[in-house]
């Protein structure tokens, strides 16, 4: 534990600055509730209104709450297809197409092949049944394997000139990463390392571990960076486990993580781009939390906690190996950073942890450096005009409200809305509210209560606003019924 009084003072100042830019428990929870509510709402709409069993998740910094206004974080989404993935043919059930995980001693770490299985028999599909399909490939043993480029033609037609491909993501915007994936209800053997390897035991908590065991594994369309057959390989992903772990972090740990992300974006991105990624720093954070005692994670020790995480990452750079937190046998540097780059990164990390505050005061993101200087004597009383804590929090609230509203407006009723006929609009709005209320009340569980209760209020507000506008246009008084809506 750090006993340097100066570091304690700097830690308290840094913690206050993070709160000024909106990194508080209340704002973190607001961000999480917003994105999880939007996720739940869109999935329920998909299932009930569009008759599809696909599920879309929001992962990454937006749903974790590990971002700030100045970071301009992307939205990371995963669209999970309904085709089941099996580890063993004994799991097969008739009536549905499914995929079987294939792995052997030659399979790259964190990767597998997906073999097509017949819907009528627990047997692999043969070449004669898929001769016209361009999304499959036959290996040397005659096995029909699904290519990880199977969705590319569809998304190229959909997004046209706006088509953006970033790693496994295919989307129509540089600010939104959408990864299409399949889901295996079981955790693959490599994804069980979190539950088997020795740990001090204080974190992750047993309740989180119990939840994590039931999450399953995603199969992402991305081959190994050093593979000879990348188009038929699928990468394992434990995104739900990672989100559970991040949701279990308190505000102090999130401040540490956000500080690490700011350091990465300010000092490492200009040198190696995104090849030293946020995920490397997140992994260093998770291993550091697990390794170091829980009592160090205090507000007055914030600076030292950042240094501990930088020390973890520096050690991996000198070892030329970065382990994955939830998947065994993986080196996260492979395919990202060259061996000759790692010593240079390690040297920067060493200097950074020895002179951390020098680096922090030069961070321009969210005016972090200026805010630190304003709290110190080095500002010399010079006026520094910066947004107040209240203004930043208001901006976050408005951003969350905008995201939630955007989620509601993608509902089929609004998406296909024709406002040229006001009477039809009012009737449709009432019917949609009634149908939503029926789903909400007849479900018998609390699953709909938070999101659909909010959506009913949104529909009522929309209906009331339209009726009030109509009354004003006709120069009629606004009725009590409208006010009650």
Image (spheres, helix red, strand yellow):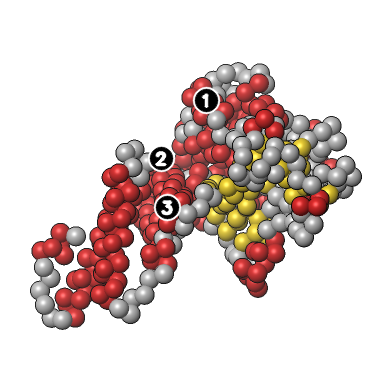
Q: Is residue 450 left or right of residue 76?
A: left
Residue 408 position in % (x across, y down): 39, 59
Q: In the image, is residue 315 above or below residue 338? A: above
Q: Secondary structure at mark 1?
A: helix
Of tags 3 and 2, the one toward the viewer is 3
Q: In the image, is residue 153 above or below residue 352? A: below
Q: In the image, is residue 126 above or below residue 211? A: below
Q: Residue at x 42, y 57 (%)?
A: 49
Residue 450 position in % (x across, y down): 33, 45
- Which mark is first along the chain, 2 or 3? 2
Q: Residue at x 24, y 68 (%)?
A: 465
- Which mark is first along the chain, 2 or 1? 2
Q: Is residue 90 left or right of residue 22?
A: right
Quadrant in which the C terminus is drawn = bottom left
Q: Secondary structure at mark 2?
A: helix
Reading the image, the residue beneath label 2 is: 25
Q: CA distance from mark 1 to mark 3?
A: 30 Å
Task: Give the label on residue 210, or none.
Answer: 1
């Amino acid at each position: 534990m750090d006993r340097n009084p100066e570091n304690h003072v700097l830690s308290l100042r840094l913690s206050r600055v993070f709160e000024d830019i909106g990194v508080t428990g209340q704002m973190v929870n607001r961000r999480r509730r917003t994105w999880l509510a939007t996720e739940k709402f869109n999935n329920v709409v998909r299932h009930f209104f569009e008759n599809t069993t696909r599920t879309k998740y929001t992962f990454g910094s937006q749903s974790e709450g590990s971002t700030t206004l100045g970071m301009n974080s992307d939205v990371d989404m995963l669209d999970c297809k309904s085709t089941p993935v099996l580890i063993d043919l004994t799991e097969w059930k008739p009536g549905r197409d499914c995929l079987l995980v294939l792995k052997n001693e030659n399979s790259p770490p964190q990767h597998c092949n997906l073999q097509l299985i017949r819907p009528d028999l627990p047997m692999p599909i043969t070449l004669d049944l898929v001769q016209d399909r361009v999304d499959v490939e036959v290996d040397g043993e005659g096995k029909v394997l699904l290519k990880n480029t199977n969705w590319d033609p569809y998304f190229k037609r959909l997004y046209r000139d706006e088509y953006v491909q970033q790693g496994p993501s295919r989307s129509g915007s540089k600010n939104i990463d959408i990864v299409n994936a399949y889901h295996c209800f079981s955790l693959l053997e490599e994804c069980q390392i979190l539950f088997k390897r020795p740990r001090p035991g204080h974190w992750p908590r047993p309740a989180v571990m119990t939840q994590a065991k039931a999450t399953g594994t995603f199969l992402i369309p991305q081959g190994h960076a050093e593979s000879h057959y990348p188009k038929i390989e699928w990468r394992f992903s434990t995104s739900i486990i990672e989100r559970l772990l991040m949701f279990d972090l308190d505000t102090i740990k999130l401040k540490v993580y956000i500080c690490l992300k700011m350091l990465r974006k300010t000092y490492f991105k200009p040198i190696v781009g995104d090849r030293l990624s946020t995920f490397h720093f997140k992994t260093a954070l998770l291993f550091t939390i697990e390794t170091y005692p829980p009592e160090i994670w205090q507000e007055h020790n914030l600076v030292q906690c950042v240094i501990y995480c930088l020390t973890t990452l520096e050690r991996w750079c000198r070892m030329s190996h970065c382990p994955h937190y939830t998947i065994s046998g993986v080196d996260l540097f492979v395919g990202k950073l060259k061996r000759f780059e790692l010593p240079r990164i390690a040297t920067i990390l060493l200097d950074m942890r020895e002179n951390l505050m020098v680096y922090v005061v030069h961070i321009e993101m969210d005016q972090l450096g200026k805010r630190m200087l304003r709290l110190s004597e080095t500002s010399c009383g010079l006026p520094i005009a910066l947004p107040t804590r209240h203004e930043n929090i208001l901006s976050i609230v408005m951003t969350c409200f905008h995201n939630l509203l955007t989620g509601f407006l993608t509902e089929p009723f609004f998406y296909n809305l024709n406002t040229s006929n006001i009477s039809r609009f009012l009737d449709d709005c009432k019917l949609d509210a009634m149908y939503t209320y029926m789903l909400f009340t007849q479900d018998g569980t609390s699953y709909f209560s938070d999101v659909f209760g909010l959506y009913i209020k949104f529909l009522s507000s929309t209906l009331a606003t339209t009726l009030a506008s109509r009354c004003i246009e006709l120069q009629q008084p606004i009725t009590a019924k409208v006010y009650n809506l």
